[in-house]
Image (cartoon, rainbow, N blue to C red):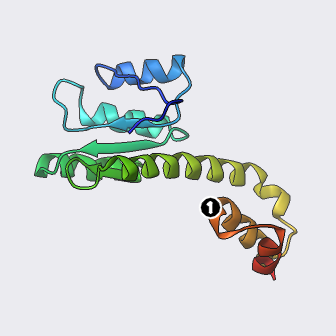
Amino acid sequence: MLGRDDSLGVVEDWNALSREVARFPCDVAIVDPAIRGSGTLAELAAFASSHRSLPVVVYTILTPEAMQATVELVKCGVASVVIRGFDDEPGRFRAVLREVSANELSEALLASVAENFAQAPVTLVQAIEQLFRSPLRFRGVTDLATAAG
């Protein structure tokens, strides 16, 4: 699943994950709330809540306990879930990881420039938001101009 330029770090528990993220740049955290001995769900939820700029992907098995934990994490802002043995084919998993990383960066960038668009026409702002959220829909400036009307 990993590409040549990717690296993977493994941690013992959610507190160790917090320490590692503080020490090393990280593009995404892949967590399994069903792993025993990794800490409590409350600790993982606290991590997700306190690291909102870091995309978190739940990668877990399909059991009632794992799904209950996953629902709790979704309430904390975790938006991506991959179920082992169902939708974890390597190409699909890579696409999920690319998507969450791109979405977080896009939303952060849009939030940082939002005040600059206060006086812009609504259709232009919507077109720019679409450009950042779905870049493959635009092949050039002409597509952006068309979307902006």
The vertical placement of 105 against 11, above or below, is below
Name the quarter where the N terminus is drawn. top left
Residue wearing tag 1: 133
Which amino acid type is marked by label 1?
Arg
The vertical placement of 50 against 92, above or below, is above
Q: Residues within 10 Å of mark 1 (few under 14, many from 20)?
A: some
Q: Nearer the viewer, residue 140 or 39?
A: 140
In the displayed structure, does residue 28 sit left or right of residue 35?
right
How far from the left and from the top, in percent, is residue 134?
Answer: 62, 64
Q: Residue furthest left?
A: 64
Q: Residue furthest bottom?
A: 149
How far from the left and from the top, in percent, is residue 69?
Answer: 23, 46
Q: Nearer the viewer, residue 2 or 123?
A: 2
Residue sitting at x 79%, y 77%: 148
Q: Secondary structure at mark 1?
A: helix
Q: Residue furthest right?
A: 119
How far from the left and from the top, in percent, is residue 103?
Answer: 57, 53
Residue sitting at x 45%, y 19%: 20
In the displayed structure, does residue 71 sit left or right of residue 46?
left
